Image (tube, helix red, strand yellow):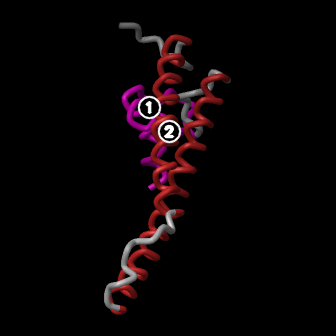
Protein backbone atom coordinates (compact mmCIF):
# COMPACT_ATOMS: atom_id res chain seq x y z
CA UNK A 1 0.00 0.00 0.00
CA UNK A 2 1.37 3.39 -0.98
CA UNK A 3 2.08 6.05 1.63
CA UNK A 4 1.51 8.73 -0.96
CA UNK A 5 -1.30 11.07 -0.01
CA UNK A 6 -3.85 11.42 -2.78
CA UNK A 7 -5.28 14.84 -3.43
CA UNK A 8 -8.31 13.56 -5.37
CA UNK A 9 -10.12 10.37 -6.29
CA UNK A 10 -9.23 8.59 -9.52
CA UNK A 11 -11.52 8.88 -12.54
CA UNK A 12 -12.60 5.27 -11.95
CA UNK A 13 -13.48 6.01 -8.32
CA UNK A 14 -15.36 9.15 -9.40
CA UNK A 15 -17.31 7.07 -11.93
CA UNK A 16 -18.28 4.63 -9.16
CA UNK A 17 -19.46 7.49 -6.96
CA UNK A 18 -21.38 8.97 -9.90
CA UNK A 19 -23.27 5.71 -10.38
CA UNK A 20 -24.03 5.51 -6.66
CA UNK A 21 -25.27 9.11 -6.57
CA UNK A 22 -27.40 8.74 -9.71
CA UNK A 23 -29.08 5.70 -8.14
CA UNK A 24 -29.71 7.67 -4.95
CA UNK A 25 -31.19 10.57 -6.94
CA UNK A 26 -33.54 8.20 -8.76
CA UNK A 27 -34.71 6.63 -5.48
CA UNK A 28 -35.00 10.05 -3.81
CA UNK A 29 -37.14 11.33 -6.70
CA UNK A 30 -39.44 8.31 -6.35
CA UNK A 31 -39.76 8.99 -2.61
CA UNK A 32 -40.40 12.68 -3.27
CA UNK A 33 -43.17 11.87 -5.74
CA UNK A 34 -44.82 9.62 -3.14
CA UNK A 35 -44.62 12.37 -0.53
CA UNK A 36 -46.04 14.95 -2.90
CA UNK A 37 -48.90 12.71 -3.92
CA UNK A 38 -49.62 12.03 -0.24
CA UNK A 39 -49.90 15.69 0.77
CA UNK A 40 -51.64 16.74 -2.43
CA UNK A 41 -54.24 14.00 -2.11
CA UNK A 42 -57.46 15.69 -1.21
CA UNK A 43 -59.72 12.84 -2.25
CA UNK A 44 -62.76 11.84 -0.26
CA UNK A 45 -61.88 9.68 2.73
CA UNK A 46 -65.34 8.27 3.09
CA UNK A 47 -66.17 9.95 6.41
CA UNK A 48 -69.28 11.76 5.19
CA UNK A 49 -71.62 9.47 7.10
CA UNK A 50 -69.60 9.21 10.33
CA UNK A 51 -70.04 11.22 13.48
CA UNK A 52 -69.03 14.91 13.33
CA UNK A 53 -66.54 14.43 16.20
CA UNK A 54 -64.68 11.70 14.35
CA UNK A 55 -64.72 13.72 11.14
CA UNK A 56 -63.24 16.78 12.89
CA UNK A 57 -60.57 14.61 14.50
CA UNK A 58 -59.71 13.03 11.17
CA UNK A 59 -59.51 16.41 9.42
CA UNK A 60 -57.16 17.69 12.13
CA UNK A 61 -55.06 14.57 11.80
CA UNK A 62 -55.08 14.93 8.03
CA UNK A 63 -53.86 18.54 8.31
CA UNK A 64 -51.02 17.47 10.61
CA UNK A 65 -50.15 14.64 8.24
CA UNK A 66 -50.07 17.01 5.25
CA UNK A 67 -47.79 19.39 7.16
CA UNK A 68 -45.47 16.52 8.11
CA UNK A 69 -45.40 15.28 4.51
CA UNK A 70 -44.70 18.80 3.27
CA UNK A 71 -41.73 19.07 5.64
CA UNK A 72 -40.48 15.66 4.54
CA UNK A 73 -40.83 16.71 0.90
CA UNK A 74 -38.82 19.89 1.54
CA UNK A 75 -36.04 17.84 3.17
CA UNK A 76 -36.14 15.37 0.28
CA UNK A 77 -35.83 18.21 -2.27
CA UNK A 78 -32.77 19.52 -0.37
CA UNK A 79 -31.27 16.01 -0.35
CA UNK A 80 -31.76 15.74 -4.13
CA UNK A 81 -30.21 19.20 -4.63
CA UNK A 82 -27.21 18.18 -2.49
CA UNK A 83 -26.79 14.98 -4.52
CA UNK A 84 -26.93 16.93 -7.78
CA UNK A 85 -24.29 19.30 -6.42
CA UNK A 86 -22.15 16.24 -5.67
CA UNK A 87 -22.47 15.23 -9.34
CA UNK A 88 -21.16 18.68 -10.32
CA UNK A 89 -18.19 18.19 -8.00
CA UNK A 90 -17.55 14.83 -9.68
CA UNK A 91 -17.51 16.51 -13.09
CA UNK A 92 -15.12 19.16 -11.71
CA UNK A 93 -12.99 16.40 -10.14
CA UNK A 94 -13.32 18.08 -6.74
CA UNK A 95 -15.66 15.45 -5.31
CA UNK A 96 -14.67 14.03 -1.96
CA UNK A 97 -12.36 16.87 -0.99
CA UNK A 98 -13.20 18.36 2.41
CA UNK A 99 -14.08 22.03 2.07
CA UNK A 100 -12.42 22.83 5.41
CA UNK A 101 -9.28 20.67 5.54
CA UNK A 102 -8.83 20.16 1.76
CA UNK A 103 -8.05 16.51 2.53
CA UNK A 104 -9.83 13.58 0.93
CA UNK A 105 -12.96 12.46 2.74
CA UNK A 106 -12.81 8.76 3.55
CA UNK A 107 -14.46 6.55 0.94
CA UNK A 108 -16.52 4.76 3.60
CA UNK A 109 -18.06 8.08 4.64
CA UNK A 110 -18.86 9.02 1.05
CA UNK A 111 -20.55 5.67 0.42
CA UNK A 112 -22.81 6.33 3.41
CA UNK A 113 -23.20 10.10 2.84
CA UNK A 114 -22.38 10.66 -0.85
CA UNK A 115 -23.20 14.37 -0.70
CA UNK A 116 -20.78 15.02 2.20
CA UNK A 117 -18.51 18.04 1.83
CA UNK A 118 -16.82 17.73 5.22
CA UNK A 119 -14.52 15.06 6.59
CA UNK A 120 -15.22 13.62 10.03
CA UNK A 121 -12.25 15.68 11.27
CA UNK A 122 -13.87 18.89 10.00
CA UNK A 123 -17.30 17.91 11.39
CA UNK A 124 -15.72 17.35 14.81
CA UNK A 125 -14.05 20.79 14.66
CA UNK A 126 -17.50 22.36 14.21
CA UNK A 127 -18.77 20.97 17.52
State the extent of the magenta-drawn residues as a range. 100-127
Residue 122 in the image: x percent, y percent? 48, 43
Residue 99, by quadrant, is: top right
> Which of the labelled discs sits on residue 15, or is there none?
none
Find disc 2 in the rendering and name its residue: 116
Disc 1 and disc 2: Cα gap in Å?
Answer: 6 Å
Q: Position of residue 69 (x, y in %)?
A: 46, 63
Q: Is residue 116 magenta?
A: yes
Side of 46 where 73 appears, left or right: right
| Label 2 SS | loop
Q: Nearer the viewer, residue 50 or 75?
A: 50
Q: Residues within 10 Å of mark 2 (few under 14, many from 20)?
A: many
For the residue pair 71 and 4, the one nearer the viewer reads as: 71
Q: Residue at x 35, y 84 (%)?
A: 49
Residue 114, placed above or below residue 39: above
Instruction: Answer above or below: position of 54 versus 107.
Output: below
In which quadrant will I find the N terminus? top left
Residue beneath the point at 42% across and 48% down:
124
- Relative to 7, say whether 39 is above or below: below
Disc 1 residue crowd, few under 14, some 14–19, many 20+, Cα 10 Å = some
Q: Earlier in the sequence, mark 1 or mark 2?
A: 1
- Residue in view at x 55 percent, y 43 percent: 80
The residue singled out by tag 1 in the image is: 110
Q: Quadrant of the C terminus?
A: bottom left
Extreme-front residue of the structure:
49
Q: Quadrant of residue 113?
A: top left
The answer to whether marks 1 and 2 mark residues whose Cβ atoms lie closer than 8 Å is yes
Amino acid sequence: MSTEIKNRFSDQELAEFKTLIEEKIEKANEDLNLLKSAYMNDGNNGTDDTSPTFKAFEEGSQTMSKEANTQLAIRQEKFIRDLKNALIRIENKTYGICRVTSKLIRKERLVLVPHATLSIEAKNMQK
